[in-house]
Image (cartoon, grey):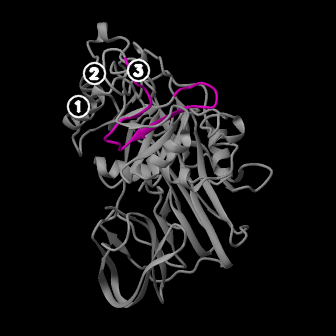
Amino acid sequence: MRLIVAITLIFVSFKIHTQTLNYYFGNLHAHTAFSDGNKDSVSSGVGRPDGSYAYAKLSDDFDFLGISEHNHYSSLRNPGFKLSRYQAGLTMANNANQDGTFLALFGTEYGVSSNNNGHVIIYGFNQLLGWESNVGGTSGNNYDIYNAKTDYDGLFKKIKNNSAAFCYLAHPYWTDFTTDGTSATALAFAPYNATYDSAIVGLPLRSGNAFSTFTNYTDYAAGNYFDYFKKLLYVGYHLGIGYDHDNHYTNFGRGTGGRLVIVAPTLTRANLYTAMQQMNFYGSDDSNAKVDFNLNGSIMGSILTGTVYPTLNVTHNDPDGELADTIKIWRGYSNSGGNWADIVYTGLSNNTISFNDLSINPNIEYYYFADIKQADGQWIVTSPIWYKGTAPVFVKENKAALKINCFPNPSSKNLSVSTGEWNQYAIEIKDIAGRKVYAENFTGKELSIDLRDIKAGVYLITISSNKGSFSQKLFVED
């Protein structure tokens, strides 16, 4: 089952310790001559994913490249993708990948860009999703798994039900991703759908320029999807914001200096997937700016509940010495009426700000995100943090820290719980509908939980003691 991409931390008045995190810069939206990319292959000599990965490895401030070929053929080079190239692309990515040095990934861009449809970037599927038959030069279907061209409901459900997969909305338009071909059912206008929320991890701040031939990092896209991002948050979706290049020429990482930035402990494929699924990423015009956005110590992408007023902290660190001209913190909540989100704090000419929000109402899930403009005009927007204060809400107290670690996650057989402190604990595991599937009390600091009787899916594990409570999304696999 596809997981809702967030680590949920519920705490009362203590801080959860986390491991050291690093910043990695790249792009997950690009094309090669396997579909309609590498349009300069005659002059560049690069026409396949393997050569494109080799080129990207030499780009500045570029730690990963995801090639997302169009999932269909239609006609030659429009976009021209065939089923046989899917497994070949996955193999080339595996051969080019170097955990710790450079990540090579292969996925697809699903769909068409006509009215009420739209493109969706998909990673984590080992089989091609599509709808075509009888493509010239091939026999049989041009897909492994059928999904009708305009069936975005079916698409999001398939992604949600694949725990290894996630999807990302490519250059979205307001009337994209409909369920019946009318704008009223477009993702931005239809009611919130929890299944879709489980599948979609985010969308770009900017995309392109798709047909740029620049190789000097300066060809920035003029447009943005910031308002669309705010609208989906207003509808109720939990999703992050990144950055796309959508390359169609051989300039991977070099057309623009903009980057999708993931926050992860080390540079591995597994950590990149986790960062995307948990929305631990942001979009940046700047090629190497490092932004720490946290709420009471929990990083962007977190979904939190507590009894204390939230404290938001933002630190902007550019190795090139650029200063943050403004840092804004936005706040909103779903179906709030009026503005989709409002600026609740602005810091001027300072790389660090802190804001304690004392105006929240209890039992409302607020979302916060940071919006940074550098002195040179470059723009950075972080994925949100969601926070619900349970009544009554207090000013944060300082108490002894509690360390909780649940591993491995995802897990299929046994889950190890380490609390770091001898105490009495209560553990509950609930499914996404709130039904309790496991409960146990124990005394000690470590416990092993047998998960073999729990069906594959997304759950919430909560561990409580007299020091507070800790919750986290738990992903159970077959």
Name the N-terminal-most of marks 1 and 3. Answer: 3
- Mark 2: amino acid: Arg
Please name the residue shown 62% across and 34% down the image.
Answer: 176
Please name the residue shown 36% across and 35% down the image.
Answer: 128
- Is there CB contact under 8 Å for labels 2 and 1? yes
Which residue matches tag 2? 48
Q: Quick one: SS at disc 2? A: loop
User: Local crowd at mark 3 within 10 Å, few (<14), some, or many (≥20)?
Assistant: many
Vertical comparison of 282 with 307: above or below: above
Residue 73: which numbered mark, if any?
Answer: 3
**Residue 17 occupies quadrant:** bottom left
- Where's the N terminus, which quadrant? bottom left
User: Local crowd at mark 2 within 10 Å, few (<14), some, or many (≥20)?
Assistant: many
- Mark 1: amino acid: Met
Left or right: 463, with 365 as reference point: left
**Residue 390 occupies quadrant:** bottom right
Indicate which label's residue lies in the foreground, 1 or 3: 3
